Amino acid sequence: MASDDLKLSTAYRITGYKLDANGRSTWTYYEVPLIQTSSLSALSNKQDGMSWGLGFSQNSAKPYNMNEMHKTNQMGIVWVMSGHLETTIQDGEMRRRCPGDGNFVHGDCLHHSTMRSIVPTTTLSLNLTKTVTPTYKFK
């Protein structure tokens, strides 16, 4: 039975990239403030977005292959809806995401994503800004 004395989190932590002191991309976490809507649920405020995107990708033959790194030049969130997505950033660390996982994309951070799955990878993205906004804060 659910308890009414639960203390819900006041923020949702989403993984993402940031620039380090040398201007190279590294992994970090961003916090999205949450508002408790009932004893068992919480939501964020409405986030202003520029556009939505839906990506359908073919899977790569093998991981750890030579790959280019690129910037997006805009900030947004990418969610994996099916398949798996491996993302490598400048410090060399690679992380793998599965359906339901989101990632905050900082437009100035170099990264490369490889679709690694036995099923095609589908992503849903929300572009938050037209340009990179270093001081961007979630509402």
Image: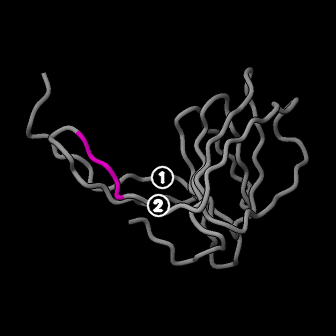
Residue 91, position as x, y percentages in the image: 71, 60
| Magenta span of residues | 41-45
Q: Quadrant of the C terminus?
A: bottom left
17 in the magenta segment: no
Which element type, helix, strand or loop, lies under badge 2? Answer: strand
Q: Residue 57: image x %, image y %? A: 78, 35
Q: Residue at x 82, y 58 (%)?
A: 69
- Disc 1/disc 2 C-alpha distance (Å): 5 Å
Predominant secondary structure, magenta span: strand
Task: Identify the image quadrant of residue 85.
Answer: top right
Residue depicted at x 73% and y 62%: 72
Above/below status of 76 relative to 43: below
Question: Residue shown at 25%/55% (left/top)?
Answer: 35
Q: Which residue is mark 1?
A: 14
Which residue is labeled 2 in the image? 30
Question: Would you say 16 lies left or right of 24 here?
Answer: left
Q: Characterize the local packing of mark 2: few (<14), some (14-19) or many (20 or more) Cα atoms within 10 angstroms.
A: some
Front residue of 12/73: it is 73
- Residue plotted at (70% across, 76% down): 23
Position of 88 with respect to 4 (left or right) is right
Asked if disc 1 and disc 2 are in contact, CB closer than 8 Å, the reply is: yes
| Amino acid type of the residue that numbered disc 1 sits on in the rendered structure | Ile
Residue 92 drawn above or below residue 19? above
Q: Which quadrant, please, contains the N terminus?
A: top left
Q: Going by the image, does 40 lie left or right of 65?
A: left
